[in-house]
Amino acid sequence: MRRPKARRVKRRDWPAYALGLPMALLMVAPFLYMVATALLGEGDTLRRVHPENFAAALAAAPFGRFFLNSAIFSVAVALGQVLTSTTAAYAFARLRFPGRDRVFTLYLSALMLPVVLLLVPRFLLISALGWADTYQGLISTELVSVSGIFLLRQFFLAIPRDLEDAARLEGAGEWTVFRRVVLPQSGPALATLGVLALADQWKSFFWPLVATSSADMQVLEVGIARLHGAYDLNWPYQMAAATAAVVPMMVLYWVAHKYFMRGIQLRV
């Protein structure tokens, strides 16, 4: 009796699999192309692979420094965005003050602005502060995430107010409610925001390109672009470096995918 039911479930779900499989292949294809190109020599075909391209590409520029800069930049920004998004989202979701919804709408309007449009004003700001080509200049302008505030606000709104009211009846203040009631239930959402912020900053290119000028401060994406010279287009080396840059994010997603998927489900 159970087998027909299992078959009915599979027959009902096959359109989702039929749609999901081509989409998955489209997502994986660029990565496979990148790895395949990284293993080629200049002008070679797939009949011969060159795993030494990875070592040669990483030795062609100070990629150890680039990795360190990307790690410092990404981790600092991710932690900062989690902190600022958590406090701002709690204020927009739980606190009552005049003009709260209008201020939040104004916040969301910032999502409509192209990121490239803000590059020059941000650079002028850090230059005026003397922070050009420094970690504080690179990090400070990325510490607030409007999308992160929106994500956490929606999650906080879904938390039952009964828990908050019960804590207040026992004498809990605003900080205690935030720290002991809201945050403990927000682990999946915080993990989701942290992973998204870390991955987003790890692949950041335009802002680090504008904010830094010396090789000692450049991040991975800018360093990989340096391998693409004006006349020397060594695609295998560039793809090898790009493959190496992707590995940390793949490990991060593999380690945190349970929290990430749970946070996405709760968000939906």
Image (cartoon, helix red, strand yellow):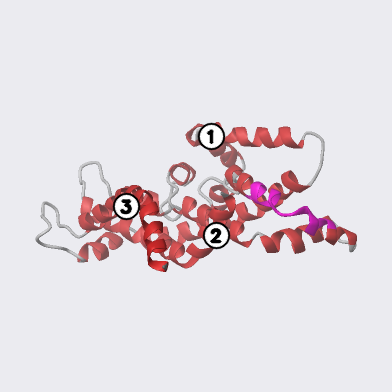
Residue tagged 1: 118
- The residue type indicated by label 1 comes to Leu
Q: Which mark is residue 60?
A: none
Between residue 153 and residue 234, name the one nearer to us.
153
Badge 1 vs badge 3, beta-carbon distance below 8 Å: no
How far, Cα to Cα, is label 2 from label 1? 33 Å
What's the magenta region? 152-165
- The residue type indicated by label 3 comes to Leu
First in sequence: mark 2 vs mark 1: 1
First in sequence: mark 1 vs mark 3: 3
Q: Which mark is residue 262?
A: 2
Residue tagged 3: 21
- The residue type indicated by label 2 comes to Arg
- Let me know if residue 121 appears in the view: no
From the top left corner, tell me how far across and down residue 39 is, in percent. Answer: 20, 60
From the top left corner, tell me how far across and down residue 44 is, in percent. Answer: 10, 55
